[in-house]
Each structure stands twice: as structure tokens, then as C-alpha cells.
């Protein structure tokens, strides 16, 4: 009994997928719920598991684009495979035995047909060679060297190359060609001249006092060492590119900046880290503070939690916060739904669950849809300051950056504090500068004074 392995549906708008990787080889025995392969669409990366035990037969190789619902392989009956194995082994043993007998018979026949070998006799000494008469060395004339060298007209040179070689009086046999079939291009001639070759070297006789072995080698072509590689964009990367261009062309994007003193947040994390971990089973990170602060600021500045739909403005009265997460196959933004109803522990657990799903290629299309505001943390990669691009159709995105100790003035004194630059990119069609600056200032106030936000420890 054969079980067909099909590409699963991941959403109504998705009609095809890229078969990115097989985890098993053709003919492998697989178990039920064991990962078989990974598919990539323009939205998600998904891992497909085996529906039952069986022997895998692959019909579609890695790197091919297949339609949703297409059959990419089969799972054969495990019992049938095991029953066929002894029979195949027996046939193989019989064939090996027959081949051995045939080889033995051939060796015996060859032994009977061969004549008896005569006893070895010492070879008679060869007569010494007569000394050859010395031939006087003669210096080849310049004319003979010109005759031995191929004429320029005989070489397959392009007209422009032939003209340049003739103008510079060069020897084309000394120039390394990098064109198709080793042909000499105009760039090869220019590089040959730049490498130190002087014009007029084609017709000048070489100095006989310098041995041929000491002549300098022609300089290797720089173009020959410049290699490139070409590979197609993955569906996710194509989707990312399209969304970024859409945001750039369809919005009036502007960015405002501020900086946040992270002293209090770092002190709270240090003080309650162990108790928080022990009670909730997750670490207390930075992202939950910024999600909480963003939700409180969104409640005050409703334009940030809205988007433009034609001639209308759609305001959301719920808070679905997208958190940008980098993966091997591209940037994805899973959405934490109703973030205003979650505790710090609930937010941290949601982030951990999404990271695990991304690592295991289990992220679903529903995990990426419906966000109303996005937060991106470039600080985990060491970014000091950047301008995040809108995650359309949302009207704003918050960019976090790395924490760095800097001198700041507090109460007319210069002190060292852990500071973070933050950036808010927004759609100026719906959000004015006053609202954007006020929103970012409110986030700064909440993060710098986290006691204003409730902590469940």
C-alpha cells in the first residue's frame, strides 16, 4: 500500500511552494510524525511530517517549485520492503556465485592456452653509441623568430582588439584571453599593458644574453580571478522585497528619533531575574518592557494603531503587536495577539514559542497576519541607529537598538548611563509629526519609569 505525500495548504492566497529541503533520502525507512521535508512559500516556511511508517520514495527533488496539493513522494509498506529484502539478497548471492565460477573457468582456460615460458637468458650488451658530431650553435635571426610567431591576422581577434594590438605593436600570443573559448578581449589587452608590458614589444628581438628561463611570466589577468555566483531568490525573500518596495512607494514614510535611559529596566531585570524565571519558566527580557510601553502609548495616540484604506482611515481598538524575528531564510514578523491582555510573563512566553516554531519550521500563515503595530530590535545584531521600514499596511514601526554606555547630563551633572537610541518610522499621510514625537516620548517615559507599568512577579 502506497501513501501519497502531498504539499499541504498553508492559506487560501498561496497556490505554490518551493520544496526547499528533504530531511530523508530516497529509500529511507521513516517513522510516523518524523520530519520529511521543508516547503517555502512567499509567507511562511513549513515542515511536513510523515503520516505513517514506511519506506520513502522521492518523486520531486529539492529546489523545485510545486503546486499546493501536488504529490512529491510516496510512503511504501514497511512489511513489503522487508519481504523483498531477503529475496533480493538471495538473488545477489546467486549472481555472485555464478560470476565467481565463470571467472575460475576463464583463468583455467587461459592457463592451458598459454605456451610454456622459456628460461631467462642474460641480455647481450648493446654496442656503445657513437659520439655525435658537435653542431655549432647559431643565433636565430629576428626574421626567423617573426616567422615562428603566429601572425596577428591568423589569430581569432575582434576588430577592436586587432586594431589595439596593431597600434601598440604587441605580441598577442603573450596575452592571456578571458573571453569565450579563451579569446582575447579588449580588456585583456588593457590589463596586459597595465601590467608593465611596453608598446612595440611585438617586433623587437629578444636579448640573447638573458636565458629563456629568467624571462618574467606575464601578469595573471585580474578578471580571471573575479568569480560570481547566481542563485534564485527564495519565495520569502521575494515577498520581503515586494513588501519593502510597496512600503517605499505607497507611503509617505518619515522617521523620528529619541534615546532612552535603560538604567531602571536593567536594575529591575537584575533584581527579579531569578524569581521571574523560577515562577514563570521564562527569562525576563527587554522586549516585554517595550511591548507594554507601546500598548500604553497606542491607547493614547490612536492614529499610530490605524492604517489608510483608500480614502478612509481604519482605527484598531485592539492591540496585535508584531515582533520582527530574523531567521536563516529571512525576516518574519509573528504577531502577539491582544498584547494588552498579557502579562510580562505571557509576552515573554509568546516570544519564546514563536522563536521555537521558527527554528522548527512550524510557523503558520495565521501567525503572521493581523498585526496593528510592529517592533524591530536591531540591537541584537549590534545596530546603534537605523531607520526601520513600515510593515504595510500598518502606519508605524518602532526600532530598538543596542544599549551602550554614554555620558549624559542629569541634574546638571555628567554621568555614565546605559542608553538606547529608538526610532519610530510612520506614515505621514495619517500620522503628524506631533503625534509621532509624542508617541515616542511616551514610550521613553514608560521604559525609563517601568514602575508605572504593572509587574506580575
Image (cartoon, grey):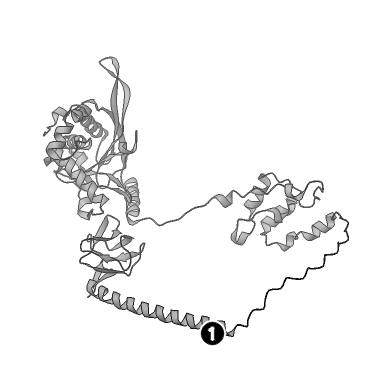
Q: Is residue 66 above or below residue 188?
A: below
Residue where numbered disc 1 is placed: 109
Question: Looking at the image, can residue 80 be seen?
Answer: yes
Question: Residue at 24% of width from left, 38% of height from top?
Answer: 431
**Residue 247 coordinates in the image, percent (x, y):** 31, 47
Number of residues whose C-alpha sits closer than 10 Å to that of mark 1, classed few (under 14), some (14–19) or many (20 or more): few
Is 217 located above or below residue 108 in the figure?
above
Indicate the secondary structure of the residue bearing disc 1.
helix
Seen at 83% across and 58% down, the residue is 144
Question: Which of the 4 quarters of the picture holds residue 441?
Answer: top left
Q: Quadrant of residue 345?
A: top left
> Is residue 427 at all visible to an observer of this figure?
no
Q: Nearer the viewer, residue 22 or 45?
A: 22
Task: Using the image as rendered, state which of residue 342 and residue 439 is in the foreground.
Answer: 342
Question: Where residue 290 sits in the image (x, y, percent)?
Answer: 21, 35
Determine whether, in the image, residue 158 is placed left or right of residue 74.
right
Measured as percent of width and height from the top left, residue 30 is found at 25, 64
Rendered view: 300 above or below 364: above
- Relative to 172, is 265 on the left or the right? left
Q: Residue at x 32, y 54 (%)?
A: 236
The image quadrant where one finds the C terminus is top left
Question: Viewed as shown, does residue 216 lie left or right of 34?
Answer: right
- Along the viewing direction, whichever of 20 and 101 lies nearer the viewer: 101
Q: Tell me the quadrant of the picture where the N terminus can be found.
A: bottom left
Q: Tell me which residue sits at (24%, 46%) in the image.
A: 355
Asked if 226 appears above or below 135 in the picture, the reply is above
Task: Pick whichever, 409 or 117, lies toward us.
Answer: 117
Amino acid at each position: 500500500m502506497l501513501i501519497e505525500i502531498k504539499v499541504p495548504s498553508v492559506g487560501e492566497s498561496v497556490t505554490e511552494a518551493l520544496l526547499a529541503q528533504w530531511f530523508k533520502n530516497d529509500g529511507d525507512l521513516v517513522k510516523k510524525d518524523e520530519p520529511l521535508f521543508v516547503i517555502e512559500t512567499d509567507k511562511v516556511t513549513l515542515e511536513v511530517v510523515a503520516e505513517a511508517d514506511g519506506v520513502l520514495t522521492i518523486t520531486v527533488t529539492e529546489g523545485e517549485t510545486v503546486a499546493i496539493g501536488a504529490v512529491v513522494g510516496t510512503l511504501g509498506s514497511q512489511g513489503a520492503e522487508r519481504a523483498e529484502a531477503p529475496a533480493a539478497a538471495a538473488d545477489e548471492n546467486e549472481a555472485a556465485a555464478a560470476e565467481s565460477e565463470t571467472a575460475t573457468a576463464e583463468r583455467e582456460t587461459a592457463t592451458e592456452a598459454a605456451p610454456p615460458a622459456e628460461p631467462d637468458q642474460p641480455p647481450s650488451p648493446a654496442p656503445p653509441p657513437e659520439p655525435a658530431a658537435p653542431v655549432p650553435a647559431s643565433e636565430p635571426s629576428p626574421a626567423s623568430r617573426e616567422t615562428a610567431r603566429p601572425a596577428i591576422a591568423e589569430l581569432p581577434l575582434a576588430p577592436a582588439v586587432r586594431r589595439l594590438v596593431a597600434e601598440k605593436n604587441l605580441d598577442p600570443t603573450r596575452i592571456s584571453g578571458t573571453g569565450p573559448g579563451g579569446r582575447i578581449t579588449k580588456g585583456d589587452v588593457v590589463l596586459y599593458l597595465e601590467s608593465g608590458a611596453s608598446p612595440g614589444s611585438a617586433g623587437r628581438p629578444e636579448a640573447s644574453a638573458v636565458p629563456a628561463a629568467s624571462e618574467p611570466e606575464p601578469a595573471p589577468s585580474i578578471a580571471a580571478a573575479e568569480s560570481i555566483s547566481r542563485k534564485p531568490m527564495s519565495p520569502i525573500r521575494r515577498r520581503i522585497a515586494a513588501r519593502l518596495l510597496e512600503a517605499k512607494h505607497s507611503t509617505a514614510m518619515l522617521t523620528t528619533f529619541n534615546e532612552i535611559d535603560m538604567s531602571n529596566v536593567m536594575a529591575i531585570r537584575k533584581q527579579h531575574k531569578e524569581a521571574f524565571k523560577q515562577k514563570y519558566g521564562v527569562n525576563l527580557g527587554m522586549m516585554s518592557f517595550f511591548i507594554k510601553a507601546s500598548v500604553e502609548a497606542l491607547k493614547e495616540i490612536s492614529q499610530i494603531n490605524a492604517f489608510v484604506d483608500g480614502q478612509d482611515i481604519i482605527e484598531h481598538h485592539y492591540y496585535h503587536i508584531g515582533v520582527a524575528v530574523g531567521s536563516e531564510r529571512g525576516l518574519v514578523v509573528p504577531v502577539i495577539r491582544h498584547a494588552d491582555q498579557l502579562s510580562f510573563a505571557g509576552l515573554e512566553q509568546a516570544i519564546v514559542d514563536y522563536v521555537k516554531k521558527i527554528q522548527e519550521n512550524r510557523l503558520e500563515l495565521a501567525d503572521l497576519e493581523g498585526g496593528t503595530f510592529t517592533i524591530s530590535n536591531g540591537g541584537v545584531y549590534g545596530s546603534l541607529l537605523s531607520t526601520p521600514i513600515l510593515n504595510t499596511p500598518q502606519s508605524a514601526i518602532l526600532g530598538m537598538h543596542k544599549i551602550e554606555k554614554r555620558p549624559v547630563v542629569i541634574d546638571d551633572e555628567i554621568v555614565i548611563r546605559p542608553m538606547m537610541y529608538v526610532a519610530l518610522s510612520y506614515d505621514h499621510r495619517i500620522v503628524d509629526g506631533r503625534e509621532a514625537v509624542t508617541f515616542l516620548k511616551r514610550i521613553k517615559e514608560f521604559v525609563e519609569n517601568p514602575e508605572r507599568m504593572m509587574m506580575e512577579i
